[in-house]
Image (cartoon, rainbow, N blue to C red):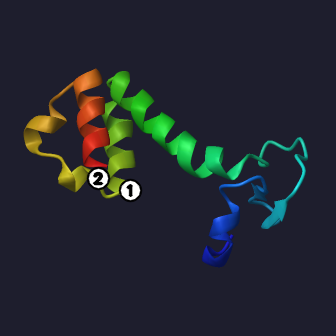
Amino acid sequence: MQLRDAHLCLGSPLPRLAPHFMALQPTGSATCKRGFCQFIYEPIKTVIEAAMNDNKDKLFGLLEKLEVLKKLKPEDKELMGKPLMKRVMQSW
């Protein structure tokens, strides 16, 4: 999907990554998800779950890709559970 199609991702069209087109009706395929869920909700959910389950290896890997890890202070990285999740969301 190209940047010019990004405005289509959040509404009702369903982005399909394999053939690279927008479907207007659900196809029942596993790769056919709503744009909002695929590009907004699932990444946020993954970060929150990793922080709350103290899975710091996975969390820091995701934060590095999102360029959020460099915004955290060393004492923030030592937090666990909900305080860590709150600090990550504030920094993001």
Q: What is the x, y in percent for residue 32? A: 79, 48
Q: Up-down: is 64 above or below 81? A: below
Residue 56 in view in this figure: yes
Identity, as a three-letter code, of the amino acid under mark 1:
Lys
Q: Up-down: is 90 above or below 21? A: above
Question: Which residue lies at the image location 11% right of the left edge and 45% below the top edge?
Answer: 73
Picture quarter with the N terminus: bottom right
Which residue is at the far bottom?
4
Q: Mark 2 points at which residue?
A: 68
Task: Say what secondary structure mark 1 lies in.
Answer: helix
Which mark is in front, 1 or 2?
A: 2
- In the visual, does 11 lie left or right of 57? right
- In the visual, does 89 lie left or right of 18? left
Question: Which residue lies at the image location 74% right of the left edge and 46% below the top edge?
Answer: 33
Q: What is the x, y in percent for residue 77? A: 17, 37
Q: Which mark is residue 33?
A: none
- In the visual, does 59 lie left or right of 49? left
Question: Which residue lies at the image location 55% right of the left edge and 41% below the top edge?
Answer: 41
Task: Say what secondary structure mark 2 lies in.
Answer: loop
Q: Which mark is residue 65?
A: 1
For mark 1, does the 10 Å Cα neighbourhood hold few (<14), some (14 to 19), or many (20 or more) residues? few
| 1 and 2 marks in contact (CB < 8 Å) | no
Residue 81 in view in this figure: no
Q: What is the x, y in percent for residue 15? A: 75, 58
Q: How far apart are marks 1 and 2 (CA)?
A: 8 Å
Viewer-proximal residue, 14 or 53?
A: 14
